[in-house]
Image (tube, helix red, strand yellow):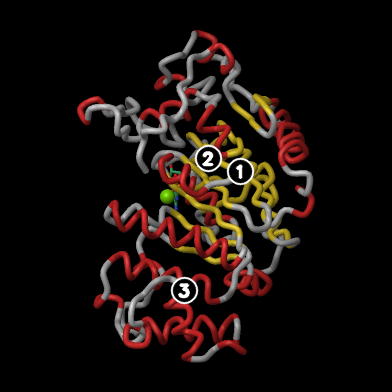
Amino acid sequence: MPADSTCQSRARVLYGASSSPGAASSLLDIKNLTIEFGSSNPPARAIEDVCLTVQHGETVCLVGESGSGKSVTALSIARLLSSPPARYVQGEIWLDGHEILGSPEIVLRRLRGRIVSYVFQEPSASLNPVRTIGSQILEALKLHQPSLATREEVVRLLTIVGIPSPETRAGDYPHQMSGGMQQRAAIAMAIASRPKLLVADEPTTALDVTVQAQIIDLMRELQARLGMAILLITHNLGIVREIANRVAVIYAGQIVESAPCSELLRRPRHPYTAALIKAVPDLGRRANRLHAIPCQVPSPFNRPKGCRFHPRCEFARPECEQNPPMLIPAGLGHWTRCPWHDRLPLAPLSTDSKA
Ligand code: ADP
Ligand code: MG
């Protein structure tokens, strides 16, 4: 095992111990997960040595730009990545006491829906265009909560997610609803099975800004009401501030920082997190001074040596090009992959920043 890997395994143990005493009974515990795609030599390593925990009832945000490995991580939780082309090279995924990677398909089918449900960026990924919303929710109930499979429960779920005139709208086809209403219906379907964990993969990215805020409010409300845990995937730290208890930042397939939400936004300890923070629109700044991180996330075939972020890092030093950095502690429950973090002027999220 490479040194990096060994150290991160150690970091994971410490991270669990210091941030969550009940880590042994975490709802979700992803341990040192590495996933590759394809048969090229070397293969495309989408995520590497990823560790992530979600406790019962908490909201964890997984944050990073496009191509960082967020969806691959999310889909792996219920083993939804088809294999091949995906290969689970290393690691374990514990979900509500079940080890996912070693479980037979019949067990996974039982866990999907009942323990973990998904909401995707496009509601069309969850909704069937040729069936009414009500019949689809009823079917989800029949599958996972047969004793609750009634029209009343369908109407109750549509009410919970804020769909007006739910008795009538249950008869609508998806195309008769706006994007925001479709996403509410997709959320109603996802929570119909009363999952312990809701995984929401960029659920607001395809929506208007005002509707985005409503969907985030809805998720916060649902969590308070139903007590489920949420793993929310986003590239927007403004959204993170609104909803997260803890945050993990992923870059080029590796977790580069993780911390309690307020700590991460007040005291970022990795230049990539600080760059994401700078990219959040600031009401106090003029629009033409919006910050963009230069260049793009490197592809799995073209990862730089040393620190994967160094070519885009405004604080990079010659050492960063050589040595792959390990996750190191940066505070209570706070981990970073930048060895220089305590010597860098990393700015916090301004209170004027908007979601
Ligand atoms: P994100 O959700 O952060 O935008 P993804 O998790 O979708 O990123 O992708 C991470 C990396 O894995 C990307 O480089 C992507 O090209 C690669 N990848 C994802 N799915 C596949 C696939 N089915 N086949 C090959 N490569 C893939
Ligand atoms: Mg994605």
**Disc 1 crowd, CA 10 A, few/some/many (<14, 14-19, 20+):** many
Residue at numbered disc 3: 160
Query: Residue under circle 1?
Result: 34
Screen quadrant of the C terminus: top left
Between 198 and 49, the residue placed more toward the observer is 198
Q: Toward the viewer: 78 or 134?
A: 134
Residue occupying the far left of the picture:
288
Q: Please identify the quarter of the rendering in which residue 27 is found.
A: bottom right
Give the Cα separation between the discs numbered 2 and 1: 7 Å
343 sits left or right of 203 in the view: right
Q: Where is residue 72 shown, x and y percent of the image? A: 50, 50
Disc 1 under 8 Å from ligand 1? The reply is no
Disc number lying in front (3 or 2): 3
Residue under pointer 2: 45
Q: CA distance from mark 3 to mark 2?
A: 40 Å
Of 316 and 107, the residue lying toward us? 316
User: Disc 3 on helix, strand or loop?
Assistant: helix
Vertical position of residue 180 compared to residue 185: above or below: above
Q: Residue at x 50, y 47 (%)?
A: 37
Give the amino acid type for the residue marked by disc 3 in the picture: Ile
Pointer 1 or 3: first along the chain: 1
- The answer to whether 205 appears left or right of 310 in the picture is left
User: In the drawing, does residue 231 fall left or right of residue 284?
Assistant: right
The residue sitting at 38% across, 28% down in the picture is 278
Position above or below: 171 against 334: below
Q: Earlier in the sequence, mark 2 or mark 1?
A: 1
Of callouts 3 and 2, which one flags the residue occurring earlier in the amino acid sequence?
Answer: 2
Report the Cα–Cα distance between label 1 and label 3: 38 Å
Q: Could you tell me which residue is drawn at 27 percent across and 74 percent down?
A: 177
Q: Dot 2 lies on which element?
A: strand
Q: Of the residues tagged 1 and 3, which is closer to the observer?
A: 3
